[in-house]
Amino acid sequence: MEFEFIALDKYGEEAGNDISTTDSLQFDYITIENATNKFSEDYKLGRGGFGDVYKGVLVNGQEIAVKRQLKSSGQGADQFKNEVALVAKLQHRNLVRLLGFYWGGGETILVFEFVPNKSLDHFLFDEENRKLLDWSRRQKIIGGITRGMLYLHEDSRLRIIHRDLKAMSC
């Protein structure tokens, strides 16, 4: 599932996207490049609207997911700043956590916690793999998605408005 969103403050105005408030989340390029074996195709997990996604392993052994923006993605600096500032503030057990970012030298990169077991669309849209999800497991997945969405809409201190929410078939 992939979505784009904006955050509004309590007055209904677009929340600030001051990336300087998240400077402590900034990774250096060499760390990300080493973690992904120089963005090796062997480490590539897939591609989304933002760009390519890679699995990486930091020096301390922590697995990460790295979203590297495509030059043709159409996302500008303001959108990137907004995403970093917003996603850094969101914390919920049903949402993937942003660990950091890199921005510079013509590169925009987001670093997330790595969630194993492939993407949900791998199990929903593949003829063989969809058999692995019985109705009890599907119900738990739907409940988790619902709790995450409820957090975004009702419980987060930021009010989230979705612009593009869809299940993806890759």
Image: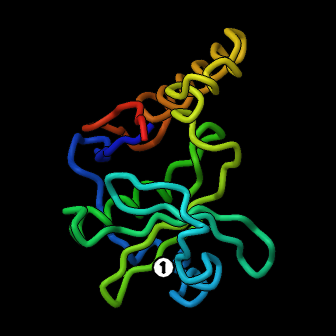
**Residue 14 percent location from the top left of the image:** 23, 50
Q: Quadrant of residue 31?
A: bottom right
Quadrant assignment for the C terminus? top left
In this picture, is 30 found above or below 131? below
Amino acid type, callout 1: Asp
Position of 71 with respect to 124 (left or right) is: left
User: In this orientation, which residue lies closer to the viewer: 120 or 148?
Assistant: 120
In this picture, is 3 found above or below 21? above
Position of 146 with respect to 20 (left or right) is: right
Identify the image's colour scheme: rainbow, by chain, secondary structure or one colour.
rainbow
Residue found farthest to the right: 61
Quadrant assignment for the N terminus? top left
In this picture, is 88 found above or below 127? below
Residue at 32% x, 45% y is 4
- How many numbered dots are placed on residues in this image? 1
Residue found farthest to the front: 128
Position of 44 with respect to 135 (left or right) is: left
Dot 1: element = helix
User: In this orientation, which residue lies closer to the viewer: 91 or 143?
Assistant: 143
User: In this orientation, which residue lies closer to the viewer: 144 or 125?
Assistant: 125
- Within 10 angstroms of label 1, few (less than 14), some, or many (20 or more) residues? few
In this picture, is 99 found above or below 96? below
**Residue 122 percent location from the top left of the image:** 56, 35
User: In this orientation, which residue lies closer to the viewer: 52 or 157?
Assistant: 52
Residue of label 1 = 23
Residue found farthest to the top: 135
Residue at 76% x, 82% y is 59
Residue at 55% x, 78% y is 24
**Residue 100 percent location from the top left of the image:** 54, 70
Residue at 60% x, 68% y is 42
**Residue 15 percent location from the top left of the image:** 29, 53
